[in-house]
Amino acid sequence: MKQLIIACCLLLLGTGGFAQFSKASLQASGLTCALCTKAINNSLEQLSFIKSVQPDIKSSSFLIEFKEGAAVDIDALRKGVEDAGFSVAKLQLTGQFNALPVEPDEHATINGTTFHFLSVKKQVISGEQVFTLVDKSFLPAKEFKKYSKSSSMSCVQTGKAGDCCKKDGVSADTRIYHVTI
């Protein structure tokens, strides 16, 4: 019985779509003082999937640790910063991966969330990996423009699946996060 359980776990881990995001690094823009940092910190700590938030006032950044096994809501992170009156300048998610195939300008679904990889090389990722979000609302406009040029798919501009995503089996209007490695 023990061997059957181990075999099932290994099978699940080998599907390529398995990942556990454990932490994030978020840099906010518009901060001018310690009270600004405190406002964002308090807002982020209210999110149910966050275990801890460690602010760094000098760099206007926050090291966020996620609760183990919790589903991470990327848009809720952005909304938490915006609700405090600021914007996200950079968001990086760190996760553990097991043989996830990644191709440039292609989609991958990880734990029910669809990611579109931009400016990457074809590869298979395993172990700890950092994804940098390159959607409009997760980085400055100049950087977004640079990344958006690497794809002609409409989802890059809208953040929602369009006709371009159907070939990858993504349903219309599904939220798509654009990332690079």
Image (cartoon, helix red, strand yellow):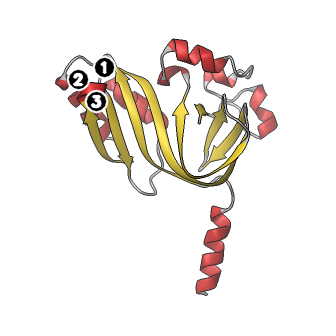
Residue 57 in the image, given as x and y percentages of width and height = 24, 28
Q: Which residue is depicted at the point 77% across and 27% down?
A: 164
Q: Which residue is depicted at the point 67% across and 33% down?
A: 120
Q: Which mark is residue 36?
A: 2
Residue occupying the far bottom of the picture: 1
Graded by Cα atoms within 10 Å as few (under 14), some (14 to 19) or many (20 or more), the crowding at tag 1 reads some
Q: Secondary structure at mark 3?
A: helix
| Horizontal relation, residue 127 to residue 93: left or right | right
Residue, disc 1: 85
Measure the C-alpha gap from mark 1 to mark 2. Answer: 8 Å
Image marks 1 and 2: residues in contact by CB distance under 8 Å: yes
> Which residue type carries mark 2?
Cys
Q: Which residue is depicted at the point 63% across and 37% down?
A: 115
Residue, disc 3: 40
- Above or below: residue 20 compared with residue 168: below
- Above or below: residue 160 compared with residue 12: above
In this rendering, does residue 157 appear at all? no
> Which residue type carries mark 1?
Gly
Residue 145 in the image, given as x and y percentages of width and height = 60, 14
In this rendering, does residue 60 appear at all? yes
Q: Secondary structure at mark 1?
A: loop
Q: Earlier in the sequence, mark 1 or mark 2?
A: 2
> Which residue type carries mark 3?
Ile
Image marks 3 and 2: residues in contact by CB distance under 8 Å: yes
Q: Secondary structure at mark 2?
A: helix
Measure the C-alpha gap from mark 3 to mark 1. Answer: 8 Å
Q: Earlier in the sequence, mark 3 or mark 1?
A: 3
Q: How many marks?
A: 3
Quarter location, residue 40: top left
Residue 7 in the image, given as x and y percentages of width and height = 65, 76
Image marks 3 and 1: residues in contact by CB distance under 8 Å: no
